[in-house]
Amino acid sequence: MTHPSPDHWRSWQGLLALLSLLLCGLLWLNGLVGSLERPSVGNALELRQQELAVLAEPALPAIWRQPLLGADPIASLRQQLAQQAKGSDSGLSGAQLYTWSLLEQLAGQQPAHELMAEPPAARSPLQRRLECELAGSDRRQCSNAAVATAALRRLLLVTLAPALLMLVGVALLLRQLWLLWRRRLPAVPLLQGPDLSLVQVTLVVAGGFVVLGELLIPMLLAPLLGSLLQPLAFDPLLQQAASVLLLYGALMLSPLLLLTLFLRQQPEAPPGGWLQWRWRPWLPSVLRALAQVLMVLPLVALAGWLLQHLWADPSGSNPLLEMVLSNSSPAALLLLASTALLLAPLFEETLFRGLLLPVLARHWGRGWGVVLSAACFALAHLSLGELVPLFVLGLGLGWLRLQSGRLGTCALMHSLWNGFTFANLLLLAG
């Protein structure tokens, strides 16, 4: 490894870096506070899961209903709709209000005036079943066997599958701890990264990524995108997904151009390049990434569980999650998947584990490099309610970067993580 570029904070680059760092802090602080005004997607996920439980009930033998679905799924759904309507500033949609009014009538209650919503033009299978029961028919007669079976299959995938994966993850974690205690873990490879100064890294991350990529470029590009995507106005979901993809691509340009400029000023790159992508051999990289995902899964779940108990209703979910959950356009979902599974892992791993972690580790040691890069990774998502789980995920990605010596493996792990989340949302959305 060559000697890194010296830090000249009193130069024009240093002053520009300090200004970028100040603006970055203000923008991130404002974004985190502003995320409190966004509803948590967790409420919508719980509601979808409860609706699946109601639909799946007829497909289950009586002996399995209470262990898997609870004592009374319909009563639970009614209670959850009431809680969400009371606790959410945005309230319930018209279709949800209509479902709630049907549930109130089934319970023998007169729906409040605000629940007297007009029946939607296209009723959901759940609404058709509730209407049938209100007409006096038996619940089993009102249930569609194919719908109940499909709902049960989806419910098992979104509940039992993650639980099984977490058990595997716990076993892998215990094995890792055992190997660490017995000092049998493989030797950690040399942490190779760009020989850039803190001034240059600050310019790339705070200046290029945050100030230019997250603030100025979207402001300048938004009017142009409105005109460019006007032909897609016939499909608002597709138009929104295309806008997300293009804005994310524009966000990447400034930091990647700055990084390329600084790297071209460096001496000859080491074997494997400055960022150490080193994708091949593919199979060991994929298996290692998958194992790391499974080990991180129970830790992220534990962090989310603790956060939920300390903060009853964490707000500020990533808007992309809600877009996937409420999207019914295959073309739009393909664009959102391209953003979440391809662009985001490649760009974010380049920035946080390819550039930031090695440079910070050079100055303050590997441990602090992993911790600080994970903190920046979590803060950059501008979601106060997801800050702790994202920090834990960032630690797992940083640990993988140290253990594997490869950035490509981190990108694969990141893509797998986003892919599991994406698939879970699709299953709940139906």
Image (spheres, grey):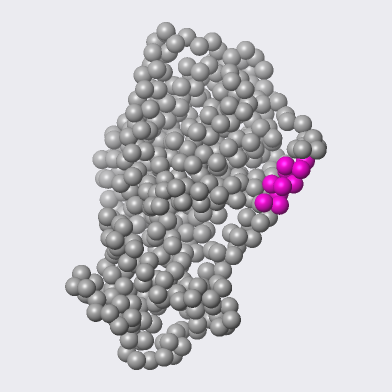
What residue do we see at 33% from left, 82% from top? 106
Q: Can the viewer see residue 117?
A: no
Q: Is residue 172 magenta?
A: yes
Residue closer to the observer: 371 or 191: 371
Residue closer to the observer: 382 or 69: 69
Residue 300 lies, in percent from the top left, at 55, 47
Q: Decide: is 329 above or below 72.
A: above
What residue do we see at 70% from left, 40% from top? 280
Residue 141 lies in what quarter of the image? bottom left
Residue 13 lies, in percent from the top left, at 42, 13
Magenta-colored span: 170-179
Q: Can the viewer see residue 108?
A: yes
What residue do we see at 63% from left, 55% from top? 166
Residue sitting farthest toward the left: 113
Residue sitting farthest toward the front: 310
Question: Would residue 119 be found to the left or right of residue 351 on screen?
Answer: left
What residue do we see at 73% from left, 43% from top? 176
Where's the N terminus, which quadrant?
A: top right
Residue 249 lies, in percent from the top left, at 42, 39
Residue closer to the observer: 299 or 369: 299
Q: Is residue 139 magenta?
A: no
Q: Main secondary structure of the magenta part?
A: helix
Residue 205 lies, in percent from the top left, at 45, 27
